[in-house]
């Protein structure tokens, strides 16, 4: 029997009004908090709601809302200094994956005296980290149950996944109501990125029966969420399905890594200031094409979940139908479908490929990929 080892040492609250439990958790950490959030979240009412929740428990809050589209890891230094000077006892991250990673880094480094550049260069923080609480506004953070952060190095715009040396969130709050504050088009791309991570995790060579079932559940939830949002952008059940997808995808990724789509989209986003979800929309089908050559049977199994009739078809033909279905779903979002539309040229491809191959999870792919393999794949997307 296949050996399965997993550990998710994070208290997790999911469901409507999960955010209301933040006060209970935070009160155990102290009476002063630093809330780190993004510029796109400031006007949603969520920061004010969190301040109110914390105030009800006697917790005062300092707000750092300086995370924008082009913000790099250096913001963790600024936020960390604010945490230290303000003598806060906890950090709360509210926003998308970038904001949450920067907030988690700030909590890790605030009391260490270590700069984020040193951390990215491999130095280990000394001393205890501040307790960190994770509130993903789009109901997903692929790395929240892993010992890794997604940070863009301000020195060279490279994206990396430095380890946290065992520094996990104290608690995670996945509340579907937070997603309703996000523009429908933006949330739609977030769901598609969740689908990519779930599909690539399902294809991972490190997967097991537990992670595979989690990923399949996530894929099914994404499909249902998208269908319902297509009919009604205010459908609460659609947001609940998306929240479940985000949760179980993150659980699965604690055991198996994502794939080429995740690696290349992170590399492209960091270097060229392209929103990661848009880069993912371009690279996702190409990642599946790579999987088609290695494990067509697995790709084909996604057909029924995606509502594609593949019954009786050979595995390769069925897998091709699945990939076309994904392309069609992305096309309906009217997204850029060529890397050249982001200003990327053929001369940029080797740098993207080299950056993508540095991610440790690329060693878990169904079949090893070289830099040249990735360049050939990226060329298809120009």
Image: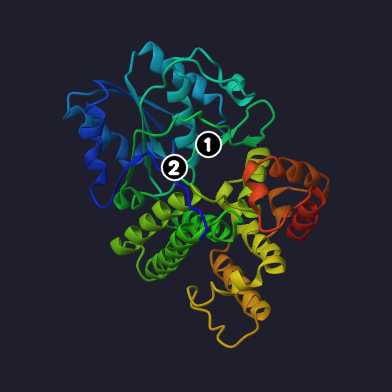
- Secondary structure at badge 1 equals loop
Q: Nearer the viewer, residue 246 or 184?
A: 246
- Secondary structure at badge 2 equals loop
Q: Is residue 15 above or below residue 199?
A: above
Q: Nearer the viewer, residue 277 or 101?
A: 101
Callout 1: few (<14), some (14-19), or many (20+) C-alpha neighbours within 10 Å?
many
Callout 2: few (<14), some (14-19), or many (20+) C-alpha neighbours within 10 Å?
many
Which of the colour schemes (rainbow, by chain, secondary structure, one colour) is used? rainbow
In the rendered structure, the answer to whether residue 98 lies left or right of residue 366 reads left
Q: Which residue is mark 2?
A: 145
Q: Quadrant of the C terminus?
A: bottom right
In the rendered structure, the answer to whether residue 263 lies left or right of residue 127 reads right
Q: Which residue is mark 1?
A: 148
Find out whether the residues at labels 2 and 1 contact each other: C-beta distance under 8 Å: no
CA–CA distance in space, label 2 to label 1: 9 Å
Residue at point 45%, 36% (across, down): 100
Res 352 quadrant in image: top right
Q: Position of residue 356 (x, y in %)?
A: 69, 44
Residue at point 71%, 44% (across, down): 357
Q: Position of residue 315 (x, y in %)?
A: 64, 79
Q: Is residue 224 above or below residue 374?
A: below
In the rendered structure, the answer to whether residue 111 lies left or right of residue 92 reads right
In the rendered structure, the answer to whether residue 52 lies left or right of residue 5 reads left
Q: Position of residue 186 (x, y in %)?
A: 47, 53
Residue that lies at the very extreme toward the bottom in this rendered image: 312
Residue at point 66%, 60% (across, down): 287
């Amino acid at each position: 029997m296949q050996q399965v080892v997993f550990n998710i040492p994070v208290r997790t609250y999911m469901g409507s009004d999960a955010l209301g439990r933040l006060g209970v958790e935070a009160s155990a950490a102290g009476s002063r908090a630093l809330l780190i959030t993004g510029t796109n979240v400031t006007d949603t009412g969520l920061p004010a709601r969190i301040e109110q929740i914390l105030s009800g428990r006697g917790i005062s809050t300092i707000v750092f809302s300086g995370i924008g589209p082009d913000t790099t890891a250096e913001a963790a230094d600024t936020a960390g200094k604010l945490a230290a000077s303000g003598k806060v006892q906890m950090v709360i991250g509210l926003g998308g994956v970038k904001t949450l990673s920067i907030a988690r880094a700030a909590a890790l480094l605030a009391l260490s005296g270590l700069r984020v550049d040193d951390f990215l260069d491999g130095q280990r923080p000394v001393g205890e980290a501040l307790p960190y609480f994770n509130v993903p506004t789009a109901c997903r953070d692929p790395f929240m149950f892993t010992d890794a952060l997604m940070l863009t190095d301000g020195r060279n715009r490279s994206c990396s996944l430095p380890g946290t040396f065992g520094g996990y969130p104290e608690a995670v709050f996945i509340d579907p109501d937070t997603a309703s504050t996000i523009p429908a088009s933006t949330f739609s791309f977030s769901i598609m990125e969740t689908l990519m991570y779930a599909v690539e995790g399902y294809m991972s060579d490190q997967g097991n029966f537990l992670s595979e079932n989690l990923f399949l559940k996530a894929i099914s939830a994404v499909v249902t969420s998208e269908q319902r949002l297509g009919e009604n952008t205010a459908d609460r059940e659609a947001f609940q399905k998306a929240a479940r997808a985000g949760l179980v995808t993150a659980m699965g990724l604690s055991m198996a890594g994502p794939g080429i789509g995740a690696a290349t989209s992170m590399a492209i986003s960091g270097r060229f200031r392209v929103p990661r979800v848009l880069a993912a929309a371009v690279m996702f089908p190409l990642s599946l094409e790579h999987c088609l050559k290695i494990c067509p049977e697995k790709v084909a199994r996604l057909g029924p979940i995606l509502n594609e009739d593949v019954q009786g078809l050979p595995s390769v033909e069925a897998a091709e139908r699945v990939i076309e279905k994904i392309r069609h779903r992305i096309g309906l979002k009217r997204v850029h479908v060529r890397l050249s539309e982001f200003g990327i040229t053929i001369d940029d491809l080797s740098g993207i490929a080299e950056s993508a191959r540095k991610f440790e999870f690329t060693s878990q792919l169904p079949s090893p990929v070289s830099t040249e393999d990735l360049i050939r794949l990226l060329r298809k997307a120009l």
